[in-house]
Image (spheres, grey):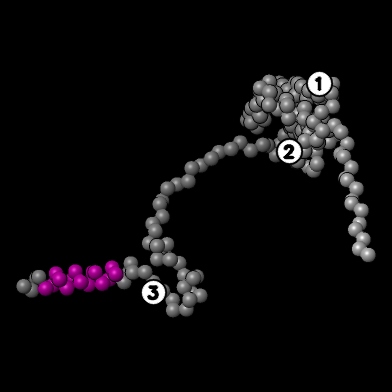
Amino acid sequence: MRKFLLALFLLAAVGVGAWRIFAPAPAPRNPIDRLKAPSPMETVKVSRSTAPAVVVRAAPESPNKMTAQRAKMEERFTDLKEEGRRIRETLIANDPKAAQAYSAISQRPEYRQLVDQRHQIEAAWATAPDGERGAMLEQMNNLRQQGIAMLLAEIQRVNSQPAGETLQRSAPGTLQLSNGQAPAPAPAPPAPIVFQ
């Protein structure tokens, strides 16, 4: 019987000790402090010990490590990426039918293929060896020229059509459909009513 009582006493002592260690902290009496206190579920959550996946990305070389030829290639590549966009925005800003022409060619599969090729070259540029970069620049230049030529041909086709509805830029980033006519003047207000 003594062994049973001793075992029961030890079990109770271990249980009380475990309860004191693992019991959540009492909630504060002040309501403001209760809002600031962590919830009991946050204290019980167990964090997983998994190592984060290591992602290795090839960073472009710093300018002081680049050769003069490579620096020129990087600069030309950046110019080619931006030049097509600048030309397109300038055309759309200056010619109201250019927006309509651009929306028409952007739906064509030939133009989408040119854009996809350009994106593939941009993605491969950072990891490409120096020997391939010259060919990539030539290909980017050819793709830009083909895209601009398609846009100019479409603008010429749209301009040769009779005046109809066109897309016009009302604000940066917004296009509005309008017809080729000037807007109709507002009707004259009715004559005032005079009571005698």
What residue occupies the far bottom of the structure in this picture?
Answer: 29
Q: Is residue 27 above or below residue 191?
A: below
Comparing 189 with 169, the one in front is 189
- Amino acid type shown at disc 2: Pro
- The residue carrying mark 1 is 157
Q: Which mark is residue 63?
A: 2
Where residue 2 sits in the image (x, y, percent)?
8, 74
Left or right position of 171 against 22: right
CA separation in Å, label 1 and label 2: 45 Å
Left or right position of 190 against 150: right
Query: Of marks 3 and 2, which one's residue comes earlier in the chain?
Result: 3
Q: Is residue 76 visible?
A: no
- SS class, disc 1: helix
CA separation in Å, label 3 and label 2: 59 Å
Where residue 46 sits in the image (x, y, percent)?
38, 57
Left or right position of 72 against 196: left
CA separation in Å, label 3 and label 1: 78 Å
- SS class, disc 3: loop
| Residue 39 is covered by the magenta coloring | no
Q: Main secondary structure of the magenta part?
A: helix
The magenta stretch is 5-19
